[in-house]
Image (spheres, helix red, strand yellow):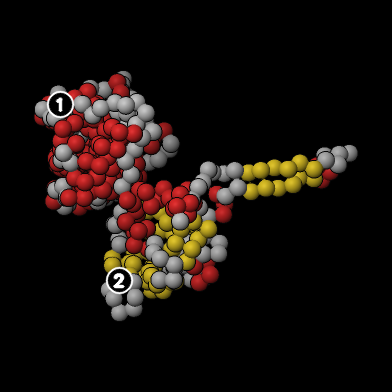
Amino acid sequence: MFKTPWRVVTTFALGLLLLAGGTICAQQFEQTPDDKEAARSLCQMIEANHISQKKIDDEISRKTLKRFIESVDPLKLYFTEADIDIFRESENDLDNQLKEGNVAFAYKVHGVYLNRLQHRLVTIARFIQAEHDFTLDESRIANPDDLTWSKTIKELDERWRKRIKAELLAKKLDDVKLAEARTQLVKRYTNFSRNERQTERSDILQKYLSSMTHCFDPHSSYMSPQTREDFNIAMRLRLQGIGAALGSEDGMTIVRQIVPGGAAHKDGRLKLGDKIIGVGKAKGEDIEDIVEMKLSKVVRLIRGEKGTKVRLKVKVAKTGETSVYELTRQVIELKESAVGTEIIETAKRIKGTKDRIGVIRLPSFYRDFDGERR
């Protein structure tokens, strides 16, 4: 029987991972005037209006730094103690920087993180394809709160070796063959690397400013414009788009659900399992390739004002053929999340009874903030 050499398999796995992170080091951000205004305004608002009446001082600065770093690398798998020591040089300066609108620290940390992730891919591929001895009695600390930052690269490598070994063992216990388990892990870390590479400036700023607001209380957060839009849609149970729930798999955008009464449902061509590979506007304009694009960005491309057109380049699930569908966006009411009522006739369920029971279903809490202001 022909067996693929270990070195070839490792090279293939490494190639996939590095392909996913191929441009990762180029994703560096600089702060913008809007970033500065957001930081300054937020600092003024929270100091003036928060019930705790706290001030943004050195204590808040130190807590912000700790919270932000742990939000970037929550499992302590990429930064070393040396990185943390460099970050801590700013631990008493962030309060003044934020009040001045300076958020460069956030982008600096993110840049270091992307660099560490890029270099870590080599180690990940090596450990995925390594021969592990599952008869050894070993242990690992799974709770990141109980971990300290690794002092050396060697110590961090050992943390990763045990992590990958544990993940392979979990697959083995689920009766997944080793070759398939390795393939699944390569896919997992390829997707993770791809998503991290596509992190947007607004995501970093939101994480950084929320690290500061959470020092006041865990429920005070800064929302980026995109997050606020998603929040408002969820709260008012209404969106403008095509009426399809989308998912992401191996860099492809897949149709998971067609909302009854929506544009896609009325058109009838888009089906569950279809893959959307391109999005465009009016006829005559280019259709943008969205393969490997972050799902949140794809959703924003497809959403739009009621009555406007959107063109979808679709790979049909049943045939594998590619087609272009033009749909007219409309208002979609998310009725399944709205309050509902029902009268239950007990006689139909319990013999000898004639009661009627009223049931109120409240799947979610909602409120149209924008509508109230109009």
Instruction: Count the marks.
Output: 2
Asked which quadrant contains residue 100, the reply is top left
Residue that badge 2 annotates: 287
Q: Is residue 89 left or right of residue 228?
A: left
User: In 3D space, how far apart are the residues under numbered discs 2 and 1 (Cα atoms)?
Assistant: 48 Å
**Circle 1: residue type:** Asn
In terms of secondary structure, where does tag 2 sit? loop
The quadrant of the picture occupied by the C terminus is bottom left
The residue sitting at 16% across, 32% down in the picture is: 96
Q: Is residue 275 left or right of residue 194?
A: right
Residue that badge 1 annotates: 92
Q: Is residue 353 visible?
A: yes
The residue sitting at 27% across, 73% down in the picture is: 286
Q: Is residue 44 or residue 165 the one in the foreground?
A: 44
Q: Earlier in the sequence, mark 2 or mark 1?
A: 1
Residue farthest to the bottom? 284
Q: Residues within 10 Å of mark 1 (few under 14, many from 20)?
A: some
